[in-house]
Each structure stands twice: as C-alpha cells, then as structure tokens.
C-alpha cells in the first residue's frame, strides 16, 4: 500500500527568531496604523489644539499639571502599600522600604494638592537645576566623543535654559512647567498628525492595497 502523506499544513511550524518576531510585530503595527489612521489624526489634532490653547493659559496648565502629578503620586503610594502588604515572597526589610516609600509618595502628592504654587516653585527649581547640570555633563561628554559637536550644542542649549530658569526663579515658577507641558502637547500632536498622514499615504498606494 502507498504511504499516506500528511497535508503540508499540518506540519509543525518552526519558532520564529527574535528578528523575525520583531519584523512580524512591526508589520502588524504598520497595518493597524494604516487601518486606523483617522483616529491618530484626530488624536494629533486634539493634542495640538490643547497645546496651542495651553500657551495662552500657562499658569492654569502649570497648576493642572501639579494637581495631576499629585494625584498620580497618591495612587502610586496606595498601590505600593497594597504590593507591600499582599504580595508574597518579599523580605521584611523590603516590605518596610516599600511602605516608607509609599508614605512618602502619598505625603508628596497631598502636599502638591494642598500647596500647588509652592510645589510649582520647587519643581521649577529642580527643573532648572537638572537642565543646568545635564547641560554641563553633555558638554563634557561631547568633548570626549568623536564627532560630539551635536552633543556639545545640545548641552550648551540645556545649560542656558537652566541658567535662565534659575536666574528668574521663583518669578517664572507659575508658567515654566506649563510651557514645557504645552510644548510637549504641540510636539506630540504634530507627530501624530504626520504619522497618520503618512499612514494614509501608504494605504492609498497600489502595492499597499494589493
């Protein structure tokens, strides 16, 4: 009797390599983007409009950002307490550290909600100091890196932003954080708009429709 051959489709598939898996996931993400480009366009327009409006009400954006950050800290603290109390396998020292950190989160969050102006001043000072320090670090790294001109230029920009913030602190506190948030919204909105229009263009190409 002739041997019965199993259908080719029943053969066990070979596992994908990491490169093949990443390529497959990238194709799925592109396909999803092309299929729902309208929603990305709407999201981009909303973010862009919010950012532009935010530039006109920077103090309000600053206070709103402080409030949202405070709420997130409180939520994070509550979650950390639950993790410390109800997860198994943690040592006593780890649980105590998690509880102390959770209390710190909750206190900081409550303080932000209670004193948003003071919180804005503190965060603005930290922001200015971070730009100042990171600017110096970038410049030093740029001199040690081959072709580090871009890094040096970026460091100089960061350094002067930090100097300007610190030199005008606390007068600039009511609007500096709001300005950064508004700019971030504008950049994110423009990115989503460009991404959605690019996806629409790809979708309309004949090879994409085939």
Image (spheres, grey):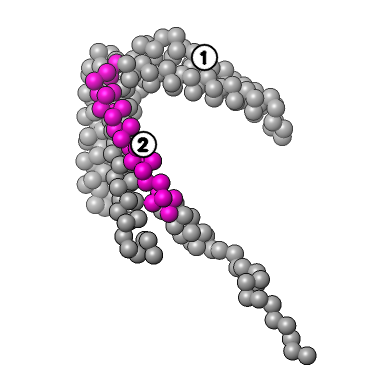
Q: Residue at x 43, y 21 (%)?
A: 68
Numbered mark located on residue 43 in the image: 2
Q: Residue at x 32, y 51 (%)?
A: 200
The C terminus: image quadrant: bottom left
Spot occupied by residue 25 in the image (x, y as percentages of width and height) = 48, 55
Which sits in the foreground, 176 or 152? 176
Secondary structure at numbered mark 2: helix
Q: In the rendered view, tell whether residue 201 sits above or below residue 120.
A: below
Residue 39 in magenta? Answer: yes
Answer few, some or many: residues within 10 Å of disc 2's Cα (few below 14, many 20 plus, some between 14 and 19): some
Name the side, left or right, on which 201 lies relative to 88: left
Q: Nearer the viewer, mark 1 or mark 2?
A: 2
Answer few, some or many: residues within 10 Å of disc 1's Cα (few below 14, many 20 plus, some between 14 and 19): some
Name the side, left or right, on which 201 lies relative to 74: left
Spot occupied by residue 190 in the image (x, y as percentages of width and height) = 28, 39
Secondary structure mostly taken by the magenta-highlighted segment of the chain: helix
Q: To which quarter of the image does residue 99 belong? A: top right
Residue with the mark numbered 1: 107
Which sits in the foreground, 185 or 49? 49
Secondary structure at numbered mark 1: helix
Q: Residue at x 24, y 52 (%)?
A: 147
Q: Residue at x 45, y 12 (%)?
A: 113
Task: Report, in whole angstroms, how far the alpha carbon at label 1 lies from the one at label 2.
Answer: 34 Å
Magenta highlight range: 31-59
Q: To which quarter of the image does residue 170 belong? A: top left
The N terminus: image quadrant: bottom right
Q: Could you tell me if residue 131 is visible in this image?
A: no
Residue 75 in magenta? Answer: no
Closer to the chain start, of discs 1 and 2, is: 2
């Amino acid at each position: 009797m002739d041997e019965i051959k199993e259908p080719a489709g029943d053969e066990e598939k070979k596992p994908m390599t990491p490169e093949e898996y990443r390529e497959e996931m990238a194709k799925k993400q592109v396909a999803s983007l092309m299929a729902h480009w309208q929603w990305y366009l709407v999201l981009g327009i909303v973010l862009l409009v919010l950012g532009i409006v935010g530039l006109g009400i920077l103090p309000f954006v600053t206070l709103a950002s402080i409030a949202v950050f405070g709420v997130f800290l409180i939520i994070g603290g509550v979650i950390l307490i639950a993790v410390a109390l109800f997860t198994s396998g943690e040592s006593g020292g780890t649980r105590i550290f998690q509880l102390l950190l959770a209390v710190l989160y909750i206190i900081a969050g409550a303080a932000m909600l209670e004193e948003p102006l003071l919180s804005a001043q503190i965060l603005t000072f930290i922001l200015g100091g971070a730009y100042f320090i990171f600017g110096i670090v970038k410049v030093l790294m740029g001199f040690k890196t081959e072709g580090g001109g871009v890094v040096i230029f970026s460091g100089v920009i960061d350094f002067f932003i930090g100097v300007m913030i610190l030199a005008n602190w606390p007068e600039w506190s009511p609007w500096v954080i709001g300005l950064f948030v508004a700019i971030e919204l504008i950049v994110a909105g423009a990115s989503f708009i460009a991404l959605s229009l690019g996806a629409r263009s790809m979708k309309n190409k004949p090879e994409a429709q085939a």
